[in-house]
Amino acid sequence: MSAAPPPAPAPQDPAEPRELPQLGFDVDEPCLRADAARNRARLLEAAAQLVAERGADCVTMEEVAAAARVGKGTVFRRFGDRTGLLSALLDHSEKKFQAAFLSGPPPLGPGAPPADRLRAFGLALLRRTADELELQLAAEPEAGRRFTHPSRRVLRHHVTLLLREAVPDADCEILAHTLMAVLDPALVHHLTRQCGMPPERLESAWTNLVDRVTCPAPSAGGLNSPG
């Protein structure tokens, strides 16, 4: 009896689909009963108003329920916890951003070289984070879900695909994690709010980082050639 053939090598990124999933905490919205849909809209409206007035850190599930004039249990059943509620508020901008880099105009969208798209991606994400920093920090997933959260996976997978085009010989999965760390909302908060760095410095640093990652290294002969 002949030996079994060796197993095929595992793909580099098995957990990530080649097609990016569409984001959205309201993907089941058409299936909701009319009263459930109205309650959800009232809860999000009340939460958005409280966040705008007091900041995301000061908003509780009980206060949102009271402002929306529904029972506290309704909030927990619909959103699970405070992070789920705040994540729902971010849903609209998440979907807009995803649409921009998946199908929008270049250089953020398709049609530009991968390095150009990577530069545009980081700049757009930094600006979006600056606009809604408090909300993003409050909706930050717990440590055990930080790297498996659907929105994080979509963004990281996009970066991985661009890196595979720009630097196919690199370990693009690890490199994508490294680049995404620079765009983390907690780091943006530390650098801009605690260290006082202007946003333009972060944007310039991102562009410089992408250039260094995606530009080919000079050959040894070029380094050692005279003059």
Image (spheres, rainbow, N blue to C red):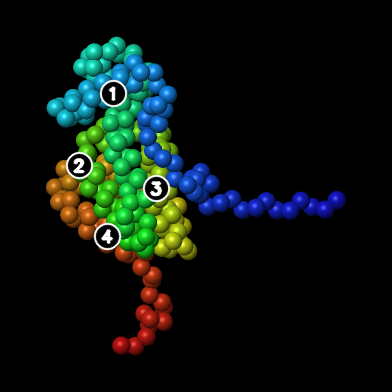
Three-letter code for the amino acid on which mark 3 is drawn: Arg
Q: Quadrant of the C terminus?
A: bottom left
Disc 2 versus disc 1: nearer the observer? 1
First in sequence, mark 2 or 3: give its number. Answer: 2
- Name the residue nearer the viewer: 79 or 146: 79
Q: What distance separates the C-alpha of mark 1 from that of mark 4?
A: 39 Å
Disc 1 versus disc 3: nearer the observer? 1
Three-letter code for the amino acid on which mark 1 is drawn: Ala
Query: Dot 2, crowdedness within 10 Å: few (<14), some or many (≥20)?
Result: few
Disc number placed over residue 131 in the picture, else none: 2
Badge 2 marks a residue whose secondary structure is: helix
| In-image side of 33 versus 203 (left or right) | right
Residue 195 in the image: above or below residue 31: below
- Name the residue nearer the viewer: 33 or 64: 33
The percent coordinates of residue 27 (x first, y second) are 40, 31
Q: Is residue 23 visible?
A: yes
Three-letter code for the amino acid on which mark 2 is drawn: Asp
Disc 1 versus disc 4: nearer the observer? 1
Q: What distance separates the C-alpha of mark 2 from that of mark 3?
A: 21 Å
Residue in the image at 38% along x and 75% along y: 218
Residue bearing mark 1: 41
Evaluate if marks 4 and 3 touch, with contact meaning CB atoms under 8 Å apart: no
Residue bearing mark 3: 156
Q: What distance separates the C-alpha of mark 4 from that of mark 3?
A: 17 Å
Disc number placed over residue 207 in the picture, else none: 4
Disc number placed over residue 85 in the picture, else none: none
Badge 1 marks a residue whose secondary structure is: helix
Badge 4 marks a residue whose secondary structure is: helix
Q: What distance separates the C-alpha of mark 1 from that of mark 3?
A: 30 Å
